[in-house]
Image: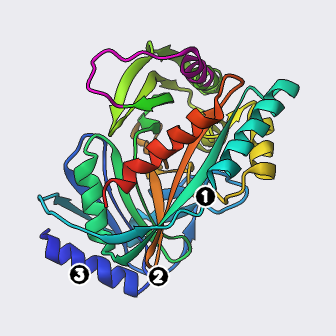
Amino acid sequence: MPKSSISERIKLQMTSQKPFVMYSNFNKNTIKALLQTNAKSYQSSGFNKAGFVFAPFNLKKHPTYLIPESVSEALELNLKSKSTSFLYSQNSKCNPNVHKNLIKKAIQFIHKTTMEKVVLARTAEIEFLNINALDLFYSIVKAYPEAYTYFWFHPKTGIWMGASPESLLKIEGQKLHSTALAGTQKYNDSKLVEWDGKNFEEQAIVTNFLKKTLKKHLEFICTSDPKTIRAGKLFHLQTLLSGTLKPTPNGFKALLNDVHPTPAVCGTPKKVAMAFINEYEPINRSYYSGFLGKIIHHSNPKLQYANLVVNLRCMQLDRNTAKLYAGGGITEKSIPESEWEETEAKIQTLKSVF
């Protein structure tokens, strides 16, 4: 479909308050779209319907929305080269000292309690004089072809878009693949990437959590060695996990509730870290560090499918303001200044598109 046509369709969807999503998978140049044909709001707590889900960080605080395949039109288009500019002025409302003091509080908490790690998030805001959301999405797809990019609109959530480097779960039939992604440093031209003990510790925490959690849902589990991957202008440590799902009735809902949120976006132990975030984190994460993606629920386990990613490197648009989200894993080895700089580097992922 030509860009002009999709542009008109997207404008119509938004003015008529009909949900839609556009997305491009990891390392793909094809953009897929699912346009809901009515303005109803569908939710999915059981994850047992086919469509595209948009889930929050805390499944108990916010609803999971669904764009059902049964009431949607599916489209596909190839991204063409286009240069777009946006007029904006930075207006960051996040005080660095507030976030650094929160990090210090978390480190003290780790020393005194059973908490090993907690992920703390913050935001930065950009104000626009002129912005076209669809052109902004195309710019993100162009800038980060290796990421899972998306543009989500729903009258209950508003506009979200992002370029996630992290897969949560991929299921094809009874085969499952997952990713443990933790550890961050800025990209440099050197092919030799060195990691310190703090980053390896973060990676081990996420990997061990997934191994333990997935074990009860899988017949067996295979784990790769950690390797360095590049996501835009950042490096991360990545471990791949895979296995065969047990034939358990309603097992997918239980699997998602067990896995999400992982220590990569919450911390460990999960309940202790979540309690700390709920009490001390000054922002409302909403759908940041939740998950999103396509699900095909089928009575025949061999035909089920899910491709879900963690909602990272994302932003929420509201009129002429973009709110960018970023977080970092805090352990007893964390240095507040370094952790602040890490969140700045993550925010730059989308900020650099403008």
Label 3 sits on what residue type?
Glu
3D distance between C-alphas at marks 3 and 2: 17 Å
Pick out the residue farthest to the right: 112
**Within the image, what quadrant is residue 288 found in?**
bottom right
Mark 2 and mark 1 in contact? Answer it, CB < 8 Å.
no
- Which label is found at residue 94? 1
Asked if the magenta segment contains residue 199, the reply would be yes
> Which of disc 1 and disc 3 is earlier in sequence?
3
Asked if the magenta segment contains residue 220, the reply would be no
Mark 3 and mark 2 in contact? Answer it, CB < 8 Å.
no
- Which label is found at residue 39? 2
> Which of disc 1 and disc 2 is earlier in sequence?
2
3D distance between C-alphas at marks 2 and 1: 35 Å
Residue 237, how many percent across, how many down? 45, 24
Q: Nearer the viewer, residue 349 or 31?
A: 349
Q: Looking at the image, is 81 positioned above or below residue 270?
A: below
Question: Which quarter shows the N terminus?
Answer: bottom left
Label 2 sits on what residue type?
Ala
Question: Which quarter shows the C terminus?
Answer: bottom left
Residue interval drawn in magenta: 187-205
Q: How many marks?
A: 3
Q: Looking at the image, is 224 positioned above or below residue 70?
A: above
Image point 26% across, 26% down: which residue?
189
Q: Residues within 10 Å of mark 3 (few under 14, many from 20)?
A: few
Pick out the residue farthest to the bottom: 16
What element does badge 1 sit on?
A: loop
Residue 23, how many percent across, how many down? 33, 56
> Which of disc 2 and disc 3 is earlier in sequence?
3
3D distance between C-alphas at marks 3 and 1: 36 Å
Which residue matches tag 3?
A: 8
Left or right of 183 on screen, residue 352: left
Image point 42% across, 79% down: which residue?
18
